[in-house]
Image (cartoon, rainbow, N blue to C red):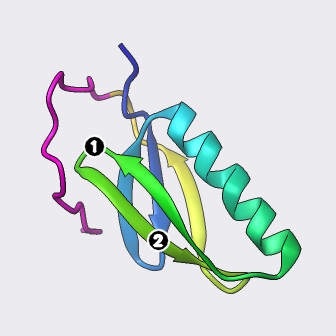
Amino acid sequence: MEKYSRLVAVSGRSFRTSKTMCDIFLAHVSDIVARGLTELVPLLHEGGVDMLLISATTPVTVTEAGPVAVPDIAPALSVVTAA
């Protein structure tokens, strides 16, 4: 079972994600910034899925969040906001 071990902060909002999802998200963000585009990027996190607007000026940071077990059934569309 994969853990929510990464904290992804985007434009003032924070999301706990798995390492795998974090890596996929960052690869997509890097590609968008390199091409000078603005796009919506999906991020699967412990509360569901969010579409995040990403551009070269969007602040994105990643930190280790400490492991939290992924539940078998997660709420579909709840949002985790920054504290």
- Residue that protrudes farthest toward the top in the picture: 1
Residue at x 87% of width, y 70% of height: 34
Residue type pointed to by label 2: Leu
Indicate whether residue 23 is drawn in magenta. no
Please rate how many residues cluster around mark 2, counting C-alpha atoms within 10 Å: few if below 14, some from 14 to 19, many from 20.
Answer: some
Image position, residue 30 (x, y; %): 77, 61
Image position, residue 18 (x, y; %): 45, 34
The residue under label 1 is 46
Q: Which residues are magenta?
A: 68-83
The residue under label 2 is 52
Indicate whether residue 77 is drawn in magenta. yes
63 left or right, relative to 73: right
Residue at x 61% of width, y 81% of height: 58
The relative height of residue 47 versus residue 6 in the rendered view (above or below) is below
Image position, residue 10 (x, y; %): 49, 70
Residue type pointed to by label 1: Glu
Residue at x 27% of width, y 43% of height: 46
10 left or right, relative to 34: left
